[in-house]
Image (cartoon, helix red, strand yellow):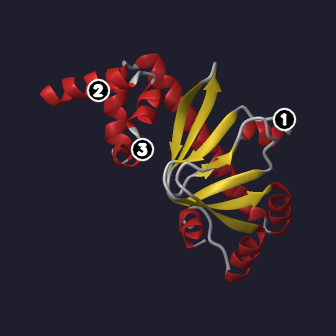
Amino acid sequence: MQKLLESIQPYIKITKAEEQVLYNAVSKRTLDKNEILFSEGKVSDEIYFVTQGCIRLFYNANGNEKTAFFYTENQFICAGESYTFNIPARENYQAIEPTEVIIFKKNKTETLLQQVPKFEIIARIATENELITCQKIIASFVTQSPEERYLSLLEQQGALFQRVPQQYIASFLGVSPETLSRIKARIFKK
């Protein structure tokens, strides 16, 4: 809970009473390595905040898992389309390592926002951050080569290479594990 409070502090100041309202509105879940947090086909009624660990967002495409993103500490996760429109989700979320998340249930979140309207700012910031992240990923696939995407990931989120299996990194970059090995070898030679 402390990590959540620290992450929202730059945006809004909350009182001890508001902290308690927030505390009463959320729950905590611990996931083991490789445990599924949420799977496709279900209708999402939860938003998650990662306090510890790493979650992989992936899709099943023709029997193959395609990694789309990695969420680490202090990031919100939501199967947005499913949550907003009450339809079955297409995405899956899996813990890459032992992970802890704070859970915001939809019905409790609506009550929370009625009790403390300034928490709307948190929802807006989480949504904006997700949108910006999606735009950056799309732009990288349109404007960068796989090697450039690798270098960007290394520069911006280098710690992922120590936390995430290489096949998931390769999938995220849109290349095979063998191609990722060749990219790494070329970069190492430079």
Q: Residues within 10 Å of mark 3 (few under 14, many from 20)?
A: some
- Return the disc, 2 or 3, that comes first in the chain's sequence: 3
Against 124, is 135 above or below? above
Q: 117 left or right of 14? A: right
Q: Residue at x 62, y 57 (%)?
A: 49
Image quarter where the C terminus lies is: top left
What residue occupies the far bottom of the structure in this picture? 16
Per the image, the residue denoted by label 3 is 164
Could you tell me how far apart the alpha carbons at marks 2 and 3 are, in whole angstroms? Answer: 15 Å
Per the image, the residue denoted by label 1 is 87
Against 69, is 3 above or below? below
Closer-to-camera residue (18/54)? 54
Q: Residue at x 81, y 35 (%)?
A: 88
Could you tell me how far apart the alpha carbons at marks 1 and 3 are, in whole angstroms? Answer: 30 Å
Q: Position of residue 23 (x, y in %)?
A: 71, 74
Q: Amino acid at mark 3?
A: Val
Q: Amino acid at mark 2?
A: Ser
Could you tell me how far apart the alpha carbons at marks 2 and 1 are, in whole angstroms? Answer: 39 Å
Against 178, is 129 above or below? below
Q: Position of residue 19 (x, y in %)?
A: 69, 76
Q: Amino acid at mark 1?
A: Ile
Q: Position of residue 178 (x, y in %)?
A: 34, 22
Against 59, is 92 above or below? below
Q: Position of residue 43 (x, y in %)?
A: 82, 41
Closer-to-camera residue (31/113)? 31
